[in-house]
Amino acid sequence: MCGFTLFAAAAWSQSFLGSIGGTITDASDPVLPQAKVVLTETKTGVQRDTIANANGEYSFADLPRGTYSISVTAAGFKDVKSGDIILTWQQTA
């Protein structure tokens, strides 16, 4: 089974954009490099995708406030989808 941890942080500049990122791990805690991570803005359906780096880390920057979900796929593991991630400016979630 594949799992992931998230962090979401609002940028403190005047752009009012935030970011979401985290680390992809499996159930026994080793990181999963090269996992595909898809971020979806739930209201519009707009998606961005990235590949986790060698440390299992991923990030999405310059995000407008909104509600997002993340899905993760990795070879040999069950796909995982997050619940809602609410990103607002001047808030750390």
Image: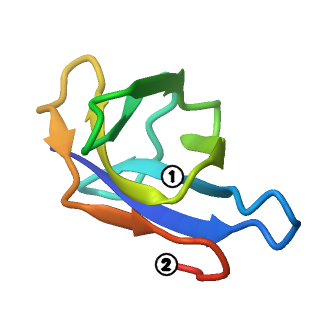
Give the amino acid type for the residue marked by disc 1 in the picture: Thr
Q: Is residue 35 visible?
A: no
Q: Earlier in the sequence, mark 2 or mark 1?
A: 1
Question: Which residue is located at x 52 percent, y 71 percent?
Answer: 88
Q: Which part of the image, by quadrant, shows the N terminus?
A: top left
Q: Which residue is mark 2?
A: 93
Q: Tell me: residue 88, above or below residue 16.
A: below
Element at badge 2?
loop
Of 23 and 7, the residue lying toward us:
7
Q: Which residue is mark 1?
A: 23
Give the quadrant of residue 60: top right
Q: Tell me: residue 65, above or below residue 62.
A: below
Question: Which residue is located at x 34 percent, y 63 percent?
Answer: 85
Question: Which residue is located at x 59 percent, y 82 percent?
Answer: 91
**Label 2 crowd bin: few (<14), some (14–19), many (20+), radius 10 Å:** few
Of 64 and 30, the residue lying toward us:
64
